[in-house]
Image: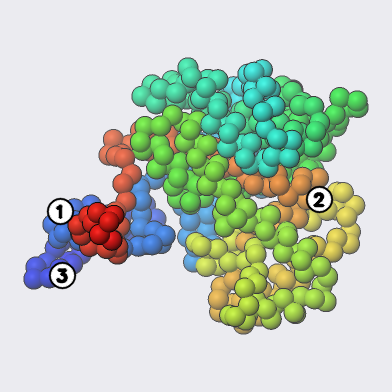
Amino acid sequence: MSNPVTLNVADHSLELPVKDGSIGPSVVDIGKLYAQSGMFTYDPGFTSTASCESKITYIDGDEGVLLYRGFPIDQLAEHGDFLETCYLLLYGELPTASQRTDFNYRVTRHTMVHEQMMRFFQGFRRDAHPMSVMVASVGALSAFYHDSTDIADENQRMIASMRMIAKFPTLAAMAYKYSIGQPFVYPQNDLDYTSNFLRMCFAVPCEEYKVNPVLSRALDRIFILHADHEQNASTSTVRLAGSSGANPFACIAAGVACLWGPAHGGANEAALKMLQEIGTVDRIPEFIARAKDKNDPFRLMGFGHRVYKNYDPRAKIMQKTAHEVLNELGIKDDPLLDIAVELERIALSDPYFIEKKLYPNVDFYSGITLKAMGFPTSMFTALFALARTVGWIAQWKEMIEDPSQKIGRPRQLYTGSPKRDYVPSHMR
């Protein structure tokens, strides 16, 4: 532990302890600040606040570093697979061969959902957004699987975790099929996690569906890149909901709802729409000029990041993945990719972008990749939620098992009316 820091408040000084992480910045413990000074801290958006202690994910935004349990994201994406990453996030270590076989078996055997969920889906309008369906159906799992909602029972927490990792792809595929009016496709146990999901999305009863291994591997890599990202908005939502003792299915549903926002999980959809709005490479200068104009509401989507002040390490992997998918599908001259490549070149060389540190982020390429695979833009955020489920669960599980955990209760800077007396209506 580092030396404490001294804070001068009014006519006295306070000593605040400093805690050190294994890597990254230290934190000033202000847990007793209000009791000792009568003051709160003010940090809108929590940009300088560590809301918890965690051993799961580390980000160095200045250096462009992302680690899952200490492992660099590029190594996991290049050499591992998504279920191996799930095991790592949940249990803290990469699985042995036998642990991996057992984990994959348990996930695979939990992929089916209760048959009555079919009737639940029929209550939605046929044009319902897949994310609205996901928020409702994930929350509804607590009604179908109430034998795994006791958060004090370690075994029930494990079963709930496995169920959500396994059933989320099935629910996401069902949401997609429902939105396009096609019959649901049951999971198939002889397929790996991502191949099974692709089949549930794109197979139809009238013909055999063969999973393209290049597309499966690309989507698996996308899932790895999105599996966790420290204390982002949706993860913080899951932790806050979980701090009240809510069941895990309700907590994950809260995370799904938060992720739906365009500033969070909807960013890849927004980036693709921006590329479509630009239309052709020759119009890029016009939009660059608009992006630099403070009086123009236009913003370049897919550039910059709340945390990363360097090149998003996930974007490098996604760039390679996008090219692999487009080459596999024979898409040589995709106008959106041409625009994306030119925008990236400008962003990495234009002094304005360099000064503002507006580097391409993971959303920049993932939207193009998912579109090429055949997913509509309305499904992009649902796929993000599918990948992030394991991160939410790992973070929720860590919070529940933390003996210092207490219900989240932020305070505020009140700027409303001071105390005043009620006036009867005839005297107002």
Q: Is residue 302 above or below residue 233?
A: below
Question: CA separation, marks 3 and 1?
Answer: 15 Å
Residue 169 percent across, percent down from the top left = 66, 33
Task: Give the residue type that dot 3 points to.
Answer: Asn
Residue 104 percent across, percent down from the top left = 62, 26
Q: Which disc number belongs to residue 372?
A: 2
Tell whether label 1 touches label 3 (CB within 8 Å): no
Question: CA separation, marks 3 and 2?
Answer: 58 Å
Taking the image as drawn, is residue 84 in sight?
Answer: no
Residue 232 percent across, percent down from the top left = 48, 52
Name the residue nearer the viewer: 119 or 110. 119
Q: Residue at x 55, y 76 (%)?
A: 356
Name the residue nearer the viewer: 28 or 11. 11
Q: Residue at x 16, y 59 (%)?
A: 38
Q: Residue at x 85, y 53 (%)?
A: 327
Q: Is the N terminus in the top left, top right, bottom left or bottom right quadrant?
A: bottom left
Q: Which disc number belongs to residue 35?
A: 1
Left or right: residue 148 compared with residue 144: left
Q: Earlier in the sequence, mark 3 or mark 2?
A: 3
Taking the image as drawn, is residue 157 in sight?
Answer: yes
Name the residue that disc number 3 marks: 8
Name the residue nearer the viewer: 412 or 33. 412
Q: Is residue 15 above or below residue 199?
A: below
Residue 384 percent across, percent down from the top left = 62, 45
SS at circle 1? helix
Q: Earlier in the sequence, mark 2 or mark 1?
A: 1
Q: Earlier in the sequence, mark 3 or mark 1?
A: 3
SS at circle 2? helix
Name the residue nearer the viewer: 381 or 15. 381
